[in-house]
Amino acid sequence: MEQGKEELTALAAHLRARRRPILEAWRRAAERDPTLTTMSALSRAQFNDHIPEILDAFERKLSAENRDRTVAAAEEQKEGAAGHGLHRWQLGYRQREVMYEWRHLHLCLVDELERYASTHVSLQPNVMPLARRALAELCSEGVCESASQYARLQQTEAAGRVRDLEQAMQQLQDLDQSRLSVLREAAHDLRGNVGIVKNAAAALRSSGLPEDMRERSIGLLEKGVTSLVVLLNDLLDLFRLEAGRDERRVATFDVSEVLGELCASMQQLAADRGLSLESHGPPALHVEGDAVKTRRIAQNLLLNAIKYTEQGSVRVTWEEIKAGEVDRWVLNVQDTGPGFADGPVTPIAHALKEATDEAKTVQEKVAGSPPSADSASAPPLTSQSNHRSTDESPGEGIGLSIVKRLCELLDASLELETARGKGTVFRVVFPRRYDA
């Protein structure tokens, strides 16, 4: 019995000394197998993976002096086999490939044992049967553990896919709700503007209308039609963005020139509202980007700020910022308007909802005035709102939705700082350059 243990220990030492040739033989056998295609891209260390540690445990099991060490070595073999299965999964192996690799390893080790037996004919009768049984346990356990690991990982992956699908479904539902909200607002705005146009047209048909009322009706008619055109164009832009029909056209442009011209063109509109419009930025700031869409983002935010601000000022600033190795530039549009909601930072999704709700409230105030004879739902020509004039169609929810979509298209982040009664700051951070 003692001699048999010594001979098993000697066999374990032989296998350790022959480790490199055994692994080489295993790799060559795998390379010759046409079913094993994934391994062709692996380095030697990646291919061997946990197998050297598994063979260490196998050798310790052969030479173990007592049952406790045998059990410990067997447990190490099992853990190593599970780790090998995980490694192969992560490399994209098919389960069949893992099984065939274990088959080739088993055959290589069998060949080594047979060569050893043929050169050691004086071994105790029970030595080689014990070694062959231990090898069979090693390789069958490796196959079983690898298969079990694959089964667990497949279940985990399947569960992850189910969660991803559930999240995708929820996102689609949220998107539908958001789209319905925007469409409801648009329908409300269209209804209000159509009412204004209808009342103005009805007044112009009156033969006894005083000249000043006629001029005022013509003005309201023109502004109502203009508002309708703007609203319809905004809806078309939003639908085109949501359908992925718009693309960014990247070219180098001067941010300071584009935003400076925009602010200059909006000065009169701000002055008509009794507001001061300030702009500040470097004399020149050359970036890569889509100048047209960048201007549209700034324009929508600026129009939103001017419409919502009753008194005070609107301030537009832009500057270059650096965060580590990434160059970016930032656009800020700040107003002294009513703000959206309490809290230092409100997510843009909440801002969109607030904008829609407030726009709806204002329009309902206008639409709630005594109806004319021509339209029960249209506001009369003499109706006024303390918050804004009737010719200013709200539509901020649509405008902000377009801003959000354009920011996504330009890989820009949209941030909001607001508090009710303390104004709002929209902050858009743009990349300074795009990868080709």
Image (tube, helix red, strand yellow):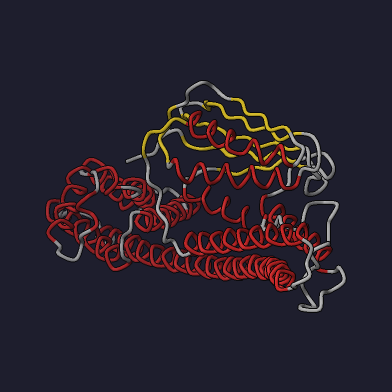
Residue 50 relative to residue 431: left or right: left
> Quarter-wise, where is residue 228 in the image?
bottom right
Residue drawn 41% across and 63% down? 145
User: Is residue 372 something that shows in the picture?
Assistant: yes
Q: Position of residue 408 (x, y in %)?
A: 51, 50
Quarter in which the C terminus is drawn = top left
Q: Position of residue 370 (x, y in %)?
A: 87, 71
In front of the other: 3 or 182: 182
Q: Position of residue 219 (x, y in %)?
A: 68, 57
Residue located farthest toward the top when viewing the structure as drawn? 283
In front of the other: 373 or 75: 373
In front of the other: 248 or 324: 248
Residue drawn 21% across and 54% down? 123
Residue 141 relative to residue 21: left or right: right
The relative height of residue 135 versus residue 299 in the rendered view (above or below) is below
Residue 263 relative to residue 306: left or right: left
Q: Position of residue 301 (x, y in %)?
A: 63, 45
Residue drawn 74% across and 41% down? 424
In front of the other: 147 or 39: 39
Residue 351 relative to residue 250: left or right: right
